[in-house]
Image: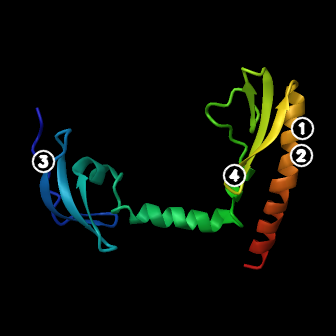
Amino acid sequence: MAGKAIDLTGKQFGRLAVIERVGTDKNGKATWFCKCECGNSAIVNAHNLRCGDAKSCGCLRKETVAKSREIYHFDGTNIARIRSHNLAKNNTSGVKGISFDKKRQKYVAQIRFRSRGIFLGRYSDINDAISARKEAEEKYFKPAIEAYKSSKEGV
């Protein structure tokens, strides 16, 4: 049994000011027409407003992404990503940039740099693939990180 919807008219949630209730969504949650501080509007369900999932019309996320790009992107390179040692969820080799090609029964070494994939070769021994990846990191990542650091020193 659903309870009575709480009137959110006039309340502020992040950048969103609630103007009026416009109906219910497919899950039976009350939906509200909101005006964002940036001037845009959005229709948001009450749950997302009250729990903090909705804070703007989407402008806040765009600003955050833009700020992140400004801080961590340099010369077409995502510095945070290349410095990260996190493995992809589907990684089975345990080493970043190394996968196993079942069809050829070889380890594949690769690296992403400036938004493009660079194939480093196929190897019978995983250690050879790891060495190729480490050499590529030195070749591509090290100069980019050094240039990034140098550019930030003058700031």
Snapshot quadrant of residue 95: top right
Coordinates of residue 47 in the picture (x, y in percent): 26, 47
Coordinates of residue 144 in the picture (x, y in percent): 79, 61
Q: Identity of the amino acid at label 2?
A: Glu
Check contact, mark 3 vs mark 4: CB within 8 A.
no
Q: Could you say whether the residue bearing mark 2 is in a helix, strand or loop?
A: helix
Q: Identity of the amino acid at label 3?
A: Ala
CA–CA distance between discs 2 and 4?
Answer: 17 Å
CA–CA distance between discs 2 and 3?
Answer: 61 Å
- In this rendering, position of residue 89 left or right of residue 59: right
Q: Could you say whether the residue bearing mark 4 is in a helix, strand or loop?
A: strand
CA–CA distance between discs 3 and 4?
Answer: 50 Å
Indicate which disc, 2 or 4, sits on the residue closer to the N terminus.
4
Q: Residue beneath label 2, please?
A: 135
Indicate which disc, 1 or 4, sits on the residue closer to the N terminus.
4
Q: Residue beneath label 4, please?
A: 116
Nearer to us: label 2 or label 4: 4
Residue at the limit of the structure toward the bottom, as seen here: 154
Label annotation for residue 131? 1
Nearer to us: label 3 or label 4: 4
CA–CA distance between discs 3 and 1?
Answer: 61 Å
- In this rendering, position of residue 64 left or right of residue 152: left
Answer above or below: position of 34 versus 137: below
Indicate which disc, 3 or 1, sits on the residue closer to the N terminus.
3
Q: Identity of the amino acid at label 1?
A: Ser
Nearer to us: label 3 or label 1: 1
